[in-house]
Image (cartoon, grey):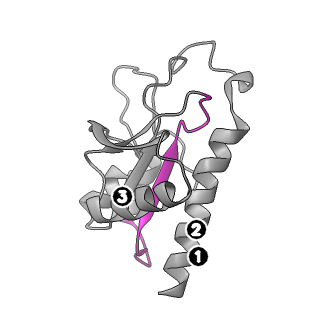
Amino acid sequence: MAFFDAEDNGQLDGWDWCVGSDYMAKHLEVQPAAVVVVDMIGDADQQLYLERNSDPTLQKQLWQIAATLGYTETFISAYRWAILDDHFPFTQQGIPAVDIIDFDYPYWHTTQDTADKVSPDSLERVGRVLEVWLEESHQQ
């Protein structure tokens, strides 16, 4: 598990994006089997679409688990975005990577993006999908 900083610069001119993940992807001592990035997933009106820069096989596994768990209303099996997020440096290194992101979050980059907007149910759904995926991956 890794936590990255300096992924999003708030659209400041002259700053690079994905600084921490880019450095890590280029300096790995051991290559992971996969990378899953969770970003902006706490929205109460959670809408997690397939993301075009993510590994399609890994994405399919995760969205199938979500469907099995009954989360088809929030894990939406349709493409909507192509995002340069912390998963992208890993895909550039040939590592399967997925970005689970609710990019329709209306408070992004505003002063209204506060803790009261975080939904425990939304966090639980994503956490449960990842828990099942990790359990299934470990058994293979």
Find residue 128 and report its image quarter.
bottom right
Mark on residue 135?
Answer: 1
Above or below, 10 against 140 in this view is above
Find residue 2 and report its image quarter.
bottom right
Q: Identify residue type, mark 2.
A: Val
Cα separation, mark 3 vs mark 1, equals: 16 Å
Can residue 79 be found in the magenta stretch? Answer: no
Residue 57 visible, this orientation: yes
Q: Which residue is mark 3?
A: 59
Q: Identify residue type, mark 3.
A: Gln
Which element is circle 1 on?
Answer: helix
Residue 109 on image: x %, y %: 51, 19
Please say if the residues under marks 1 and 2 sit with CB atoms less than 8 Å apart.
yes
Residue 132 on image: x %, y %: 58, 68
Question: What residue is rendered at 32% in x and 67% in y?
Answer: 95
Q: Identify residue type, mark 1.
A: Glu
Q: Which residue is mark 2?
A: 132
